[in-house]
Every structure is written in C-alpha cells, then in structure tokens.
Image (cartoon, rainbow, N blue to C red):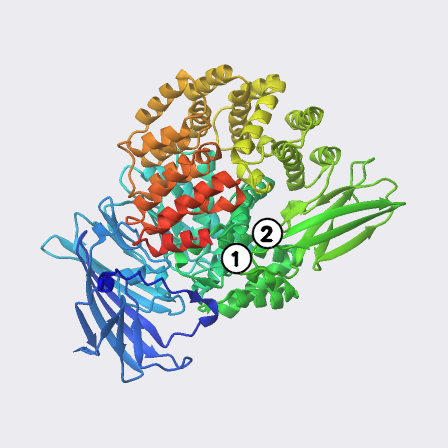
Amino acid sequence: MNDLSNTPLAPAPAPVINRADYRPPAWLVPEIALDFALSLDATRVKSTLKVERNAAADGSATLRLNGDGLVAQEVLVDGQAHNDWRMEGGDLLIDLPGDAHEISVETVINPAANTQLSGLYASNGMLCTQCEAEGFRRIAFFPDRPDVLSVYSVRMAGDKSAFPVLLSNGNPVAAGEAADGTHLAEWHDPWPKPSYLFALVAGDLVATRDQFVTRSGRTVDLAIYVRAGDEARTGHAMRSLIASMKWDEEVYGREYDLDLFNIVAVADFNAGAMENKGLNIFNTRYILADPETATDADYDAIEGVVAHEYFHNWSGNRVTCRDWFQLSLKEGFTVLRDQQFSADMGSAPVKRIEDVRILRAAQFPEDSGPLAHPIRPDSYQEISNFYTATVYNKGAEVIRMMTVLAGLDRFRKGTDLYFERHDGEAATCEDFVKAIEDGAGLDLAQFRRWYAQAGTPRVDVSLVHEGETATLTLRQTVPPTPGQPEKLPMVIPLRTALFDRATGKHRGEELLVLTEAEQSWAFDGFAQAPVLSINRGFSAPVAIRSPSSNEDLVFLAEHDDDPFARYEAMQQLVVQHLVAAVEGQLSDAERDAGRRAIGDAIAAVLADPALDDLMRGELLILPGESYLAEQIPAVDPSRVHDEREALKGWLGTTLGAAWRDLHDRCSAVPYSLSAEARGARKLKTLALVFLAAADAGEAARRAKAQYDAADNMTDRQGALMVLCGLETPERATALADFHDRFAGNMLVIDKWFSLQAGSLHPHAIDHVKALAEHADFTLTNPNRVRALYITFAANAGAFHAADGEGYKLLADLILQLDPINGNVAARCVPPLGRWRKVEPGRAKLMREQLERIAAVPDLSRDVREQVTRSLE
Ligand code: PHE
Ligand code: ZN
C-alpha cells in the first residue's frame, strides 16, 4: 500500500495577486528594439532591451522578464552570451552586476497554433497581436506590467506576397525589399508606452484613407485596413473616427499626437477593440457597416467603439495605469467619454436610457452575485476576468457622478489638471480622484468609497405630506458582497424634483446629496402631496425603492420633463406589476387594473405628438427579464418569462389597432440614417413584437412582408427575429433565405446564429444544439461562439429550462472551449454563477454544472477562477 508516490499532485492553485502588494518595478526599460522574422507558424523574435535599475525601488540585482510559453534560444548581456540566466515558471531571471545593461533574447513562436488569440496570432492568413493585459509576454521576455514604459523600435521582415502590409505603432521610418521575395519595414514610436500597447500587423490588407487636421494645424493621415472586398464598408467607421478626433479637441481639449492613426479590422478577436498606440486593432464587427448588412444598433456601436479606442489615446495611453487594479482609471473614464460623445452625436436622452439599460442588465446582476467586485478590485488571479461591466460601466457611472457634483465646466478643470499632472505617467485611480478634487474644487473624501465598496446601493424612499410640508426621507443600504460583509454609507447625488399635481409642473430641480445612512429634507408650500421624481437622468447608479402608486407613475410618464425619469416611470409601472404577478400577489381585479394602467400609459405614449420616434421606442420597450428577475428573491425565471409574455400578449391584443397603424405608418418611411427614419425602424419591429405575442398568424404575415420588402438590415433582422420566435412556416423560409443571401459574410452569419439562439421559440434549446453542429459553427472564432452561446445564456426562456438542459449545454461548451480559448470560455461562466438568485431546484442544477467544471483538472486560470468564485 505505498501508492502514495503515484498520487498525482494537485495542480498548484494560481497565486492571488493583491493590490496592497504593489511594489515599483526593480528595473526599468527605457528602450526596446524588436526584430521579427515573420512566418505564420515560426516567427523569430529578437528583442533588445536597455535596462536600468530603478532608483525609486529597493534595488534587486535580479532582472525578471515575464514570459508565457516562451523558450529563450539565446540570452546576451551587453553583447556577451550569458549563462547565468534561469527560468522560474515561464519567467526568465538574470542576475545583473551593474545599474544599466543591454539584454538580448531570441525566441521562436508559432502564431498559427495560438488559438487563445493573445500575443501574436494568425487570423485568415494575417498576423496580428493582442497584448492587453498580459499578452506581450507571449511574444517576448519583458517586465510585462503597465508601469514599465519604453520607447519601441520595431523591425519586421517577411514574405511580400503573404504580408504586403507591415504595420506597428508610431511612424514608419524605413522600408526595403530583398531579392528573395521578402520585404521589411521599420517603425518607431516616440511616445514611451507600456508593453500592453504594443501592436504589430502583417497581412494582405487594403486601406481606406482620409485625413484630419488638428486644431493646431497638423495633418494626421488616417487609414482603416481591412480584407480586400470589405473596404466599401469602412465609411461609417472613418466618419466616426474623424468626429471623435474633433470632439476630443472641443470637449476635453485633447489633440492627437502622431502623424498617422491606423486601424486594422480582424475577424478573430477576443474583445471589441484595442487601443494600441497609433495602431488600433478592431474586431471587424465594430468597423464594417453598410445599410444592407448592419443594423442601426451596429452603426451606433461602431461609432461608440471607434470613439472609445480613439479616446484612449489620452485616457489610457498618454496617461496609463500603474497596475491592473487601476483598470477603471482608463476604462471607466473612457466609457464615460464615449457615452458623452455618442450623446452629442445623436439623441442624448435615448443614449442615456440605453446606457442605463445595459448597466441594469449586465452590471447590476454582477454586483449582486458571487463575482461582485469594486470598480477598483483588491485582488485577482487572472486579470482578464476583470474586464467587467463593473470596471467599465459602473466605473463610468462613478465618474459621471463627479460631473453631476461639480458641473461640466468644473469637471473639465479637473480633467485638465489630471492630464497635466500625469501625462507620460502610469497613474492610479487615487491620482484621478485627487486631480478632480483639486481641479474641480470638490471634497471627494467620502466619495472615494465608490472605488472600494462593491454592490449596488439601495435607496429606500418615503415621502410624507403634512399640512403644507412634504418630507422626503432617504435611507441607503449597500448590500454585503464577497469579502465585504459590512459597508459604509456612500455619497449618492440624486437629481430630484417635486411635481405639483394640479399644474403638472415642478418648481425647479434640486440636487440632493445623500451621505448618511438616513437623511430627510423638508419642502414647504405644497397644499397637496407632490409627486416625486428622483434620480433624474439616473444621476447615481443605485436602485431606488419608492412606493409610488400607479397614479403617480402614470403622472410622471406623462408629465416629467426629464426624459430619463419619464422612461423610468414607465419601467417602474411595468416592474411593479410584473413583480407582483410573478410573486402571485395579484387578485384578478388587481391584475386587470395593473394591465389597464400600463395599457393607458402605452396608448398615451403612442399618441403623444411631442415625442420623437426614437424616444417613443424607448418608452415602449418592456423591462428585460434579467432586470425583472433581479427584483425577486429565489426567482423562478420561467414565471418571469411567462408573465412578461402574457402582458405583451394582452397589450398586443388590447392595443392591436394601434400596433397595426404604427407598423403601417413606419413601414412607409424610406431608409435613411436620419433620426426620423431610425425611429420609424425601431417602432416598426417593436409593433411586430407586440403583435406576435397576440396574433401569431398576423404577425408572421406582417413580418414576412417586412422581411421581403427590406432594403436594410435593421428591418430584415427585426422581421427575422420575430419570425424566429414563432412556430410558423415563414420561419424556415426566411431563415434559409437569410443564410443564402449572406453566405460568406461572417458578421451577418453571426446574426443568423444569434437570432435563433435568442428566440422566443419553444424549441430554441434544440435549435442551439443543432446549430452547434452546423458547418458554419466553429469554436475558434469568438464572435461565432458569442453569437450562439452568450445569446443563448441570455435567453431566459431557453437557458433556464426546468430540467437543466440549458445549464448542461453551457457547461459542455465551457469545457470544450477552455483548452482552445480560456479567455472566452471564462466569459461563459457568469450565467451559471447566478444560482443563488434562482429557486432551489434550478440552483441545484446550476451548481452541479459548476461543480462538474471545477472537477476537471487542467482548467485555464481564467475558467478556474470564475468557477471557484461562483461556487463560494
Ligand atoms: N482595452 C480594450 C478597450 O476597452 C479592451 C480589451 C481588453 C481588448 C483586453 C482586448 C483585450 O478598449
Ligand atoms: Zn477601453
């Protein structure tokens, strides 16, 4: 019985990295030269680093160069072959005698085998890089941390026919050709940058070009590189880029700082896009658009992401992050900037509503679940898991509150000071807060808790009217989150107005800043109890619990002059009704009364001549299932789904004539990108959605007609979406037509997958299983995986099948995908982690799948961390 020697060792758990353990780098690398001999499956990389001991750190003689899967072929120190280097894990360690040395290391990497899409990888015959957060260490040995800033010189040589275009950061400084069919290019980036901003692209690409003249009169050459055949679909991205460059000069005083700005679009990409200095790399879905293949939502997303990446040139690149715990320093701020930009380009109220809807659908559930973390996390195992809605979207909300507290002009003084103080530095969230404090003249001492405490604060409201006085009492609670059982009160700025019932008007908005656990405000001169409009514009990312009556909500939905508050009143009217319905608290009479109140409010919105159609569309969209489910403990997701569908059906029937008129009216509006035409398209499909819940036959006929008449993707996708949810013969015909029509267009075929995976069809889960076997499905393209599985996991009706089939399907995918792409696999874990929120039967089934994943020995660090946290 001495089998002990054969017991396999449990894999060492990945170390936990703590924010509190930050130490400045022992060695700096002021310059690096990279020399690439390019090939799809064996690229030779020679890196030469000038290293200097960091006087500001406790001097270690050992230089640590991070590596991930790299094998050093040769290590030179000051030109001499050096034999004292050693490996520790993937890292290369060298003991150095002096204060400054030159280190050269050569490695060979295989981009074609890199399915993780981190580091240098191949996509459709082209080579490209993704280095954030820790991908550079898969290319070259380097202190791969954002506080080591270097000036990069890059030389690359490769076959001219395979790689006619050779790009890197900064400016091209040399090019040449050799007799053997290879050519070379040299690039130099004058701006010191961290390794995560390095980029290289080599491939057969065509450029669309334009120019931008900066406010100081410099001409910047702009280029968007895509595969041949796609160049006709780059116009919207280019216009968005130019608009962003101008906007950042006007609104934030930020001018571009190189003579050229390149964008490359790539089909295989883990995220949306990447802000590499002077060479942004984009997922094709955020570049390519024309009316036939891209929806209005796609156009908006392109505008927003192009702007986001461009804005990073200042908020991210010129001022970067000291360490990855500070990620929200660049992401929260840059999301706020892109939101402000999009608001200025289109309808600000509609943009605000959309942003809040995303926050509630994605970030609120994260903040109330096992993966909750502050916008500045305290620890992580795999940083890729922290590119979250919390760091990005809540991060933006936190900075937006500073704009509410300071006003935009003073906030701008704060950002000016921030850029002035920290240009060229790797900064912290604290640096940002301090600069806003000093520049805008705010005291943010208590406000800083927004960076430290996780969880969505909840504000309970009571409004008592006595005599002529209305007393408003607000009580805040921040729920416990993992590792944070106790919370302190937050600073919660609430834009508030009290409406006079008689006049339908208020006396001016006030900013109430809640800082205590409980606070009261008295308002005099109200003969009648006023109607409360609070958190207008969604001035704070909190959940308001207000016992508003249906009458008050209907009043606000009609009278509120704040468009967000109007939307919110409509939402609240439906949320209160559906939550009560799901919880079984409604008598038949109450159900009827609730439905009638909602129906009347919707009829009023449909008839209101003062509304534009884009805004009308927002007011008509019912709250989503995930947001509804959030309001109900131990929820049965199928009850939420059924009640919401039942309400839709009732509204479809009761307001049938109005929906038909709306569909007719909007179908007559010709295609253009004007707000009017976009509004009409939004309403057209919305009308179908309500009709489909009431009369499938008629909806199918109308949807088929809309599909056949469509001269744009918004109408076509909308019609197909409705057909996909119906058991009707038109469904299969339209799906087949769509697939034929767009065969070969990867982005549109993604839509074909998502429409089926997200459909209301009772057999959606079987459709997903069949689609996973479809010839067009592949695990190596992240867009395709997301189109099928992330969409499916968000389709509550299908994913939460009572027998647990949906959970098993997702777990199967995670296990299959993990060895191929751990990063994308880990993004599929959170839907299973919501188990604590659902009723015990499903909770058990979800946990079982998490446990099944956890039992697999060789998980990626990404999936391991997410699964472990989800089970705790
Ligand atoms: N930094 C990118 C952005 O937000 C996102 C990203 C992160 C892309 C990690 C790739 C990898 O703009
Ligand atoms: Zn970003």
Residue 772 image point, x, y percent: 31, 34
Q: Name the spot of residue 574 as percent of width and height, x first.
A: 64, 33
Rendered residue at 33%/73% (across/down): 29
- Furthest toward the left, the residue is 180
**Horizontal and vertical percent for residue 303?**
46, 44
- At numbered mark 1, what does the secondary structure look like: helix, strand or loop? loop
Query: Which residue is the extreme one toward the bottom?
Result: 97
Residue 531 occupies which quadrant of the picture?
A: top right
* Label 1 vs 2, first from the N-terminus: 2
Circle 1 packing at 10 Å, graded few (<14), some (14-19), many (20+), is some
Q: Quadrant of the N terminus?
A: bottom left
Q: Amino acid at mark 2?
A: Thr
Confirm or reject: label 2 Cβ below 8 Å from ligand 2: no
402 vs 583: above or below:
below
Label ID, residue 60: none
Q: Is residue 261 above or below residue 733?
A: below
Please tell me whether mark 1 or mark 2 is closer to you in this view: 1
User: Which label belongs to residue 456?
Assistant: 2
SS type, badge 2: loop
- The reply, left or right, for residue 286 in relation to residue 128 is right
How far apart, in angstroms, are the residues tagged by discs 1 and 2?
13 Å
Q: Using the image, tell me which numbered label, if any, was put on residue 482.
A: 1
Q: Is residue 272 visible?
A: no
Residue 82 appears at what percent x and percent y? 18, 78
Q: Residues within 10 Å of mark 2 (few under 14, many from 20)?
A: many
